[in-house]
Amino acid sequence: METRQSSIFATFIFALVFIIGGWLFYKHISQTIVDEAKTSEKWPVVKGVVSYSNIKSKKTDGKTMYSPDIKYTYEVQGENYTGNRISSFESSTSSYSAVKKDLIKYQQGKIVSVYYNPETHSISMLEPGTGFLTYVITYGPLLFCFVGLLMLLQVIKKIGVFIFALFLGIKN
């Protein structure tokens, strides 16, 4: 009976961690990224110039990951700025050719449309709006909450069976 109780307790703790952790990640990280991605569609746009375009590589767990490494300059109200973000969510991939294909759009010297935050002009990107990864970041933490709720239901079920068994044992 001791292992059953510790198993129920451990499941209960994990359920709480999944629910609380998933919710906190969703509220404080996911929503911030998604809000910026959505509002960036309405940001003002100016012309800019790509001043640097290359592929960045990084070894992670013995695997080489690649991501675009670009810089672009733009001017807002007579002030010069430098940006380096393509979209609201940057990611890396193990496919060198995929990143190389993406960088064809942003070759050095190319004139690009730069979307900038009207409140903080130094915040900018070249491709505003939401994408697939934005939705993964949004709904992934909620999936953790759902798993936590399922675990919590399992705990309630086990406790209910235990109490029912005790009740039957007292009656006899």
Image (cartoon, rainbow, N blue to C red):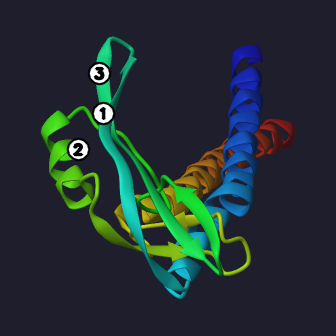
Instruction: Using the image, tell me which numbered label, if any, was put on residue 99.
Output: 2
Q: Residues within 10 Å of mark 1 (few under 14, many from 20)?
A: many
Question: Whole-Å distance between the Cαs marked 2 and 3?
Answer: 13 Å
Q: What residue is rendered at 75% in x and 44% in y?
A: 16
Q: Nearer the viewer, residue 143 or 156?
A: 143
> Where is mark 1, residue-wise?
66
| Quadrant in the picture for the N terminus | top right
Q: Residues within 10 Å of mark 3 (few under 14, many from 20)?
A: some
Question: Whole-Å distance between the Cαs marked 3 and 1?
Answer: 7 Å
Picture layout, residue 50 above or below residue 69: below
Q: Amino acid at mark 3?
A: Thr
Q: Amino acid at mark 2?
A: Val
Q: Nearer the viewer, residue 149 or 98?
A: 98
Which residue lies most toward the right here? 170
Residue 60: image location, x then y, percent: 40, 19
- Residue 30 location, quadrant: bottom right
> Where is mark 3, residue-wise?
64
Residue 170: image location, x then y, percent: 86, 38
Q: What secondary structure is marked by label 1?
A: strand
Q: What residue is rendered at 58% in x and 52% in y?
A: 150
Q: Residues within 10 Å of mark 2 (few under 14, many from 20)?
A: some
* Nearest to viewer (mark 2 / mark 3): 2
Question: Whole-Å distance between the Cαs marked 1 and 2?
Answer: 7 Å
Residue 161: image location, x then y, percent: 68, 44
Q: What residue is rendered at 67% in x and 56% in y?
A: 29
Q: Nearer the viewer, residue 89 or 114?
A: 114
